[in-house]
Amino acid sequence: MAEFTMELNDEQKEVRDWLHGFAADVIRPAAAEWDEREETPWPVIQEAAKVGIYSLDFYAQQYFDATGLGIPMAMEELFWGDAGIALSIVGTGLAAVGVLANGTEEQIGTWIPQMYGDVNDVKVAAFCSSEPDAGSDVASMRTRAVYDEAKDEWVINGTKTWATNGGIANVHVVVAVVDPELGSKGHASFIIPPDTPGLSQGQKFQKHGIRASHTAEVVLDDVRVPGSCLLGGKEKLDERLARAREKARKGGERVKNAAMATFEASRPAVGAMAVGTARAAYEVALDYAMTREQFGRPIIDNQGVAFQLADMRTQIDAARLLVWRASWMGVNGKPFTAAEGSMSKLFASETAKKVTAQAIQILGGNGYTREYPVERMHRDAAIYTIFEGTSEIQRLVIARTLSGMPIR
Ligand SMILES: Cc1cc2nc3c(=O)[nH]c(=O)nc-3n(C[C@H](O)[C@H](O)[C@H](O)COP(=O)(O)OP(=O)(O)OC[C@H]3O[C@@H](n4cnc5c(N)ncnc54)[C@H](O)[C@@H]3O)c2cc1C
């Protein structure tokens, strides 16, 4: 086992500085424009593809960094640039991870390249789980997938909502119910290939923040996909369902929820996004506090302002440490016995909301205008306590993990 260190290695520092350069030179200058336009920033995604940031290779390289710090470091730097644009760049990764986690080698090889497209024709992908009546309560999902044995096809019907890149994606990954008796254990994931009839975009949402990221409903009306689009394949699904039915029949047996373990490993990445936004706002506020003069001295000379900055920085660093711990645990297969992944997401997302609000206060009237970026950062930060499980759901998961009570 490697010697304990709190320092990034040389290779990580190099990647971090490279990403920071892209965030500072390409993402940050474009942030205000795409926030106003409320459109997917295709030219910025293309720039990211050109330098290799928008690619499966880059994502996989960070994902397999044995220290676990590759992904959080990348997220922090990109989201430091701008949350809406960064989500447009990494949103495809959510769908790609869904395929990497559950797909066969053939499915990974076929579909992931189509999610990214190529430098001259970039594409995006969407992961569609949430529904109008199934947000936090994933088990109440209604989108139904029925197997048509004669044609070896799945027929999918339902409405998904809040899908990042929904409707504009080349490839959609859709979670649907295959056995309604089994609750969340009766769900399966499907690839919906490009231009499949029956899939359409519903409402595109106008949002409070991360406005450069496209969020929309996805309507599935008698969507037919080949049997090969079921992630993991039919045999594996049948085995999994048989096991779940057997456990349900025996009743009362506590089943380890594999989906929960996956969330514990993926939530630190969202925590890292929040750290990036919080750090960005803190840096603007620190700079402003040192240069803005009132009563004949920089405002940071007032303890009331200086202490706020001290608290902001302390909380950001604490959030990053929780994120790094959970990411390290995930990569090294450590059991999340205290829901450390959820802890990191909870603390980092609440920190981002608080710190960005404090940044507005420190900038006074300027903080409240679009002349300065902190009001956008504050609007953006609000998403972190909502998606990938709200703060209340994180607390519920942590509490139930600590108490040993089952998590549905
Ligand atoms: C911009 C954006 C992008 C998104 N991207 C995606 C995506 O790409 N794919 C996808 O599938 N989904 C996506 N989501 C959906 C997101 O994950 C859900 O919004 C989130 O899980 C919450 O669900 P909900 O909005 O239905 O809120 P609800 O579940 O209705 O919750 C409403 C409120 O009730 C609280 N609450 C609910 N249950 C409990 C409880 N048991 N105890 C205490 N409080 C509770 C919640 O914490 C919340 O405060 C996205 C959402 C947004 C806003």
Image: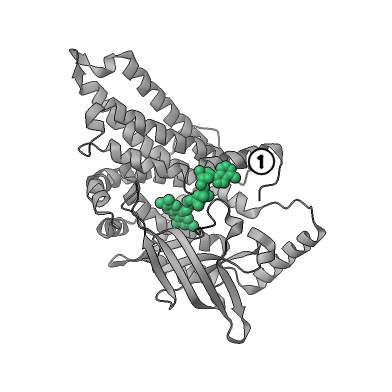
Q: In this image, 259 relative to 254: left or right?
A: left
Q: Position of residue 367 (x, y in %)?
A: 26, 32
Total marks shown come to: 1
Residue 256 seen in render: yes
Q: Which residue is mark 1?
A: 401
Residue at 57 percent of width and 61 percent of height: 141
Question: Residue drawn 54% across and 68% down?
Answer: 105
Q: Nearer the viewer, residue 4 or 332?
A: 332
Asked if one can make out residue 11 in the rendered structure from this viewpoint, the answer is: no
Extreme-left residue of the structure: 296
Residue at image position (61%, 57%) is 139
Q: Nearer the viewer, residue 211 or 288?
A: 211
Q: How is the image coloured?
A: one colour
Question: Amino acid type of disc 1?
Answer: Thr
Residue 48 in percent (x, y) is at: 30, 55
Q: Residues within 10 Å of mark 1 (few under 14, many from 20)?
A: some
Q: Is mark 1 within 8 Å of ligand 1?
A: no
In the current view of this chain or complex, which residue is farthest to the front? 133
Figure quadrant of residue 49: bottom left
- Tell which residue pokes out farthest to the bottom in this image: 150
Indicate whether 302 appears above or below 136: above
- Residue 365: x and y in percent read 23, 29
> What is the secondary structure assignment of the residue under circle 1?
helix
Residue 294, image quadrant: top left
Q: Is residue 215 above or below residue 381?
A: below
Q: Residue at x 39, y 27 (%)?
A: 313
Quarter placement of the N terminus: top right
